[in-house]
Image (cartoon, rainbow, N blue to C red):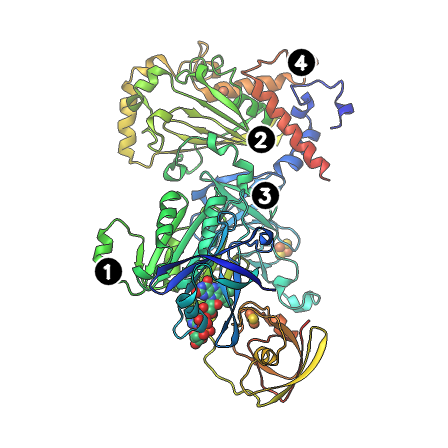
Amino acid sequence: MFYTLKVTTVKKETSDASTISLEIPQELKKVFEYKPGQYLTLKFSIEDKEVRRSYSLCSAPTLDNVLTIGVKRVKDGLVSNYINDTIKEGDCIEVMPPDGRFFATIQPQNYKTYYLFAAGSGITPIFSILRTVLLTEKHSYVYMIYGNKNEESILFKEALDELQELYNDRFILIHTLSRPKMKWSDLWNSKTDLYRKGRVDEKSIEWFINEYPLYAQNAEYYICGPGSMISNTQQALQNIDVPNDRIYIESFGGNTTAKTIEGYDNAQLKVEIAGKIAAITVPKGKTILRTLIDHKYEPPYSCEGGVCSTCICKLKEGKVHMKNNLVLDEKEIEEGYILSCQSIPISEKLEVVYE
Amino acid sequence: MDKKSEMGKKMMHDLPVEAYTSQEWFDLEMKEIFSKTWQFAGLIEDVQEPGDYISVQAGLNNIFIVKGRDGRLRAFHNMCRHRGTQLLRAVGKGKKAITCPYHDWTYDLEGNLISLPKQKEEFPELKGELHKCGLNLHEASVDIFKGMLFVHPNKNAPSIMEFFGEVEPYLGPHIVEELVEYKEKDETPFYTKEIQANWKIIVENYIDHYHLAHLHEGTLNMYDHAKAEFGWAGPHYWFYEPLIPAYAQDVKNASPQPLIDSVSEDKIGAYVPWLFPNIGITEGESAWNTFHVTPLAPDRTLVVIRSKMMNVSEWEFTKQYTKSSMSKVWQHYGNKGKYDGDPETDPMASGDFMLEDIYACEQQQKSLQSPFFSVGAQAQRGEFAIRKFQSVVKEWIEKHQELK
Ligand SMILES: Cc1cc2nc3c(=O)[nH]c(=O)nc-3n(C[C@H](O)[C@H](O)[C@H](O)COP(=O)(O)OP(=O)(O)OC[C@H]3O[C@@H](n4cnc5c(N)ncnc54)[C@H](O)[C@@H]3O)c2cc1C
Ligand code: FES
Ligand code: FES
Ligand SMILES: [Fe+2]
């Protein structure tokens, strides 16, 4: 279900990223309630093709009365560049209500330690969690490490500096830069020793956790960033026995497995969707989801990146290859669940059901 | 403890006298108070490195705390899931796995059962992965409050800040983590003593403002009792009093140990809160102490005091001691017995306020069994905290009995 929301402000944050704020009309306040860490799904029609993309909310639910997302350009990316190039104040955008399993459950009486790991545009949901925790949970601590290419690509730099100053007794922020522009001697001589050189990887995380041991013992770990940053961080945490049920991960997609698999040409697909049964042919290499959309069906989906599981369906017969899967666990796959946005037929006959 | 059975019973203030003498009450408190609250377990430096552990008796539960490689503390009930044998002894270092001495069942530091001898032959019913067989260690909770470790027997205990949050603003400004513990040569705590009195008699003595100027007229008179402020925050008691002017003026010289530098000059004084149910803190100008009370029997209680001071060299302590012994303040205040007598054998002539308190507590306990005993009257300000403490004990027990 999409709603039309109006853009109230567009702000260029860095040379390749902008924040877009959307107004929530009074009657939609309930529908658009969210938890810090969740995302919106936006729908556009670009070059006659309907496309959807998910963007994490960087605003904080109890503190801001607009919905704000931060969009960073992806090289040759369709939607991220479209947004940065064309969206302006007063535009209307089609938006699905907030969703996602990556969120922090905030309660004023909590006494927790939040370890936040962000890199690049992965700061967006982390920034929402950060602000909500600091302003709502007066006993909790936040230890954050944030990776960027250089000083100029740091999103929300000023706001982060401000939070650091305001909450210096319970918020630690370390910036780590992979290709800093300044000479390091300058940095060391200046006021701050909170910059490091390098990436958010196993080495820097080991250092970080040793350097800043937790005080409040109920700890949670939130990770969001591109490509291998997530798996590296997760690995580093597992290396030191952080239990998996304390680790929360959000992937923005984009890191499709390198190996390409030949799809079956013209596979015969039987599909049960919205109580109806249809039979269609899937061209070689096309996903089940895209084929259905091309045939004017309306399958549920949002990220189209193998991340959100909105497009989930059950495979009753045949075989598929999933290009990317960042949500389904082994048990779900054993039970036959697939992400239709990522599934290419690799058998002649298939049958799927959207439950 | 219904109203009817209370009628006609002899009362202290809010609690019947038998609450201080009977085994029945002792058992009730063990079950409903000491096994259902956050319990003091030590200081953060007690568990420093990954693999280090301590175990503590907290009411009816024995709980151990171990640090993981991620720096986070875990707490488990110190009890083998096979036939219950206690797993770990008091303290230790460098654990990677925990093996029960009895039949060698072995657990990892997350409490998962990972191996047991003759699994296939003897326990054919334990199939699949061992840690999914429902025989992992029972998890407890551990957290840190003001440099102290606390444990709670439940895995999903209410946050420690829900319990202590209200009293926190009334505590001293001392940064406890910077201080270092003063220990005796044999590594034992600063002070350990078994007292022949019910634990509540000792708590009531600790929170009794009325006695300060009398029992301790020659020992604690460097504090200005007339200017004391005190009250309750949640189930906890808070207390503050400044130094007397003569001591305050010369405190830099007169203080027996180096002044604690996290306390600014205008905040110097004695902060003496009581955290429910059984841990007091004494936060002074040069020492920061925990005063931990463990009930052993209806009329026997263990008191352990641990003391932390400034992290400075032995030389600094010697210099301060020399300056202090030359200060005129101590010629008039702080160490004179209430009565004349042999300070070595008579607590009331010792000039030591701890001995005075112990003496008073034990003498009071002795009278509780007398048919002629009763509480004569209550000082409305100076003893208000005593009635309040009794009502908190009573409410806590009633609340937990109702939950059943
Ligand atoms: C839950 C969720 C939350 C998200 N939140 C944000 C957010 O807050 N801010 C934000 O900027 N983006 C966010 N994204 C990513 C966003 O949805 C788009 O994937 C991204 O903007 C690229 O879309 P595009 O149409 O520009 O690129 P496409 O045209 O889809 O792709 C172009 C090329 O870029 C690669 N690519 C796609 N996505 C990425 C990526 N994320 N990183 C690197 N390479 C990529 C593709 O493999 C392809 O080769 C989020 C994604 C998800 C699933
Ligand atoms: S639409 Fe998000 S996983 Fe397929
Ligand atoms: S009681 Fe522990 S192994 Fe048997
Ligand atoms: Fe006393």
Residue at point 41%, 18% (across, down):
B223
The kind of residue tagged 3 is Pro
- Compute the Cα span from label 3 to label 4: 41 Å
Q: Which mark is residue A182?
A: 1
Q: Which residue is mark 2?
A: B235
Q: Which residue is mark 3?
A: B158
Residue B25, image x and y in percent? 68, 29
Q: Nearer the viewer, residue B380 or A228?
A: A228
Q: Residue furthest top?
A: B340
User: How packed is label 1: few (under 14 Cα within 10 Å), some, or many (20 or more)?
Assistant: few
Disc 3 with disc 1 on a shared chain: no
Q: Are marks 3 and 1 in contact (CB under 8 Å)?
A: no
Q: Are marks 1 and 4 in contact (CB under 8 Å)?
A: no
Residue at point 44%, 19% (across, down):
B352
Disc 1 with disc 4 on a shared chain: no
Q: Which residue is mark 4?
A: B373
Is label 3 in a helix, a strand or a loop? Answer: loop
Q: Is mark 1 within 8 Å of ligand 1?
A: no
Residue B193, image x and y in percent? 51, 29
User: How packed is label 4: few (under 14 Cα within 10 Å), some, or many (20 or more)?
Assistant: few
